[in-house]
Amino acid sequence: MGAGLAGVGAANKLVKQGFTDVQIIEAFSQPGGRIKGSLFGKLVVDEGPQFIHGASMDNPIFQLAKEHGLLEAFMPIDNIVVYSSTQEQLNPEFVSQMWELGSNITYRAHLLAKEKGYEMVKSLLDAYVSEVSKLKAAWSNDPVDLINQKLGMLNMVLKSLSVDYAVHSLADVSVHSNEEQYMEGGDCNSLGLYLKLIAKLLEPIPQERLLLGKPVKQIMWNGNFQSEDGTGYPVRVQCEDGDQILADHAIVTVSLGCLKENAQSLFHPNLPEKKLHAIQSIGFGTTNKIYFEYEEPFWPENISEIGLHWQDESPLIALKSNIAEWWRCLCLFNLLQPAERYGNVLVAWVSGREAKFVETLSAEELGSTITMLLRNFTGRPSLPEPKRVLVTKWFTNPYTRGS
């Protein structure tokens, strides 16, 4: 159940091991789950994942991509221009140094908490704030503007990491999150890689074994359900259209967000209490993308990212929650490259409560808000509005309920 990467991967492995009676049931009208493409600009863009986080053979996604020859199209992600709310462009070397400083704090947060004997440190934000407080004290002889600039950059790192974790704040992420999960190799940005990967994994699976547009109503398990020829099966899958599928085994790979909403009614009998507790306790957030297409580029040549630095923000000062100012969460725009292939397209990333909120806004509202923001930061009042806007909607989608 579910034709995302997990479901298709499981079916692929079963078919390769000689199982012939394998059926995939998918609620969406196309396979992929959260791997989804939409036509925007000149080509199909990724509504879902586009990065490999940890580009090394320790990463199963990287292994699969290499096995299927999909590693040739990585985009550069290290050439960034950062504009400040003071309408100045920050020094690239300064940006790089501060970004590395902030990233190292979070990657080593569990070690810092242990080594330095922090008490009551439970989240990444706790560790980050503790370290930044010490750094600020060490900068006491720096000019005030420079200190604020440094703190603004460290807060920019916080925002970026919140998007990576799909949370509103790193207060929602355990200080131990990187203890076992961090993989070497850095981040690789490869547009369309996941779409190609799903297609490759589907190749050995007969087309008639993939049922699309088939939402599941209930999974009855641990029973004895009779087929027309009298054969007994322990599993019966009831689809919303009234069809029933009998099976020896069911592999359920639906989104955790969907399970959180439907686990109590989806399974009969109910899942064991330990599984229900795990489903409700594990965090599952939302990250959305907003794509903007422009007639002409307004950004410098040969850059891969545009960053927004808020001079008045600091990890040491909690922002008052104001969803009307959702745009304050924005810190990075990726450029789709090369422009000859994709057009003049920027993509912004939003996570947490703001990600849910942007799903309620129209393309016109998003376009005008981003234009106002970019004009303020670049100091260019004539900066053009985008000609097209696309926002993903992973939270309101009933078959994902998050990303």
Image (cartoon, rainbow, N blue to C red):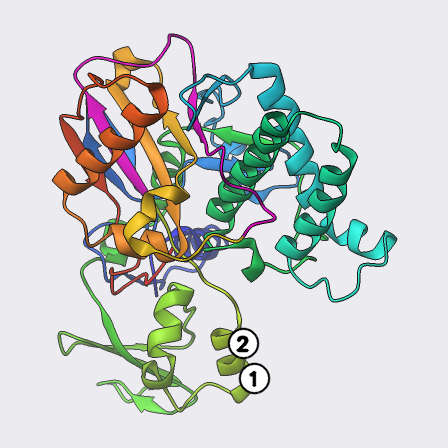
Q: Secondary structure at mark 2?
A: helix
Range of magenta residues: 289-317
Residue 361 vs residue 391, the one in the foreground: 361
Residue drawn 63% across and 33% down? 56
Q: Is residue 388 above or below residue 330?
A: above
Residue 275 vs residue 166, the one in the foreground: 166
Judge left or right: residue 154 versus residue 120.
Answer: left
- Is residue 293 located in the magenta-colored stretch of the structure? yes
What is the number of callouts on the image?
2
Residue 133 vs residue 295, the one in the foreground: 133
Residue drawn 19% across and 16% down? 382
Q: Amino acid at mark 2?
A: Ala
Query: Pointer 2: what residue?
Result: 278
Q: Is residue 225 above or below residue 22?
A: below
Residue drawn 43% across and 74% down? 249
Tell me the number on the disc at residue 124: none
Q: Amino acid at mark 1?
A: Lys
